[in-house]
Amino acid sequence: MGPIIGMTPEKRAETPGAEKVAGLSQIYKMGSLPEAVDAARPKATLVNSESADDELTNLNWLHESTNLLTNFSFGSEGLPIVSPLYDIEGDDVPSLGPSCYPNPEKKSATSKPPYSFSLLIYMAIEHSPNKCLPVKEIYSWILNRFPYFATAPTGWKNSVRHNLSLNKCFQKVERSHGKVNGKGSLWCVDPEYKPNLMQALKKQPFPSRSTFYTPPASPQSGSLSPHYLSSVLKQNQVRTLKGEKPLPLKTAVQKKRSYSNAFNHSSAMRLHESDSLATSIDPKEDHNYSASSMTAQRCASRSSVSSLSSVDEVYEFIPKSSHVGSDGSEGFHSEEDTDVDYEDDPLGDSGYASQACADTSEKGQPDKKMRKQSCQEIDEELKEAAGSLLHLAGIRTCLGSLISTAKTQNQKQRKK
DNA sequence: TGTCGGGTAAACATCG
DNA sequence: TCGATGTTTACCCGAC
């Protein structure tokens, strides 16, 4: 892969510990890091991870959805945004999968991932809710995602530590004193080097689904296919124009919750995409908000157990056997699958409100009134959410046009 | 051919 | 004392 700018081994010249921590303190204005990261996030995006998924009024999913929608249209620096997701999503989206890997399906799950240790660490850290992980959890993340390392010689852990120590991209943060988190420090990605890492990540070929093992999150997690979401969005735009009530998107979201863990969890490119988008809008923008917090929100929103700090805990929550689909694909769910699941269990965990309303009314439950009332309340919230989505979509559109206008002007100025 | 990034191994120190 | 963690050094390899 290409060189990562600024990754020269100069850390030894730095005084370990104090300066780095101080540096991060400046970045995060922190006491202990998780709190500080939270504090660094804009209030509007602050999420109680425990309730994020349950709260119907929570609009993180809108952030995510609009991000996804936008990411389909453009990437940063004119680079096409491509993703292993595309390989999964179907024919209607560009796919680089097969061309990146000859016979990707034959690529063993135990084959070496095409990412450098720096990138693996980066992905692991970025994938964590707090954007910082202890070494042990970095190991776990890598192990979970790349089974190759389960059978690989133990030296890889040394390499991970070596990278953490050597790479300027990674900063060590002392754990907060109040917590008993075991020994060792937390490792974070230096925001200054994020673009470099992103650049390096972009240059990576996409691993096959088997190489990049993607454990699904909790059943409650998941995001939407851009196509599905955009279709609902379009419908709602039409409905709004007609003066009709928008479709309860949140309901649709919940219905589709388990739609695609791959979509939700292909962290490499999801990081990629979100960061690309963020930097494409304004490279000077606070990384914590534009990239990290968005990813963090996804981590928070994608899983009801995301309040657990450990990815281990999250992944252990779901048995690995469930990752393998009937078609042999690992950790990926087709839309059809989840639809079937949904039909099998329309209420399920998804809390599909309208369906619940219909069911309860049909069955003539004694507390009809109560249920009807709660259904109405839920619908109100759903309307609100739908409205917000439309609003955000509008903002995105405006931003998109502004960016393109700016680019055009920039090009014109350059020509002059 | 030299440089650089990446991978690996190893030694050593520190800490819980 | 032991194991995990962190740092440093050295060497090799491949890409450019």
Image: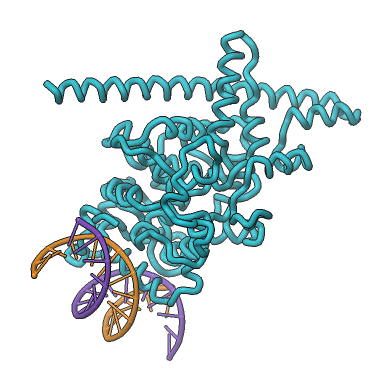
Chain colours: A cyan, B orange, C purple
Q: Position of residue A101 (x, y in %)?
A: 44, 55
Q: Is residue A166 visible?
A: yes
Judged left or right of residue A412, residue C6 is: right
Judged left or right of residue A402, residue A234 is: right
Depicted A180 relative to depicted A296: above or below: below
Q: Position of residue C16 (x, y in %)?
A: 20, 56
Q: Quadrant of the C terminus of chain A?
A: top left
Write down the quadrant of residue A239 in the picture.
top right
Residue found at x 46% / y 20% = A394
Judged left or right of residue C12, residue A375 is: right
Q: Position of residue A302 (x, y in %)?
A: 56, 44
Q: Is residue A311 visible?
A: no
Q: Residue furthest top?
A: A242
Residue found at x 62% / y 33% = A253
Q: Position of residue A219 (x, y in %)?
A: 65, 47
Depicted C3 relative to depicted A21: above or below: below
Residue found at x 54% / y 45% = A88
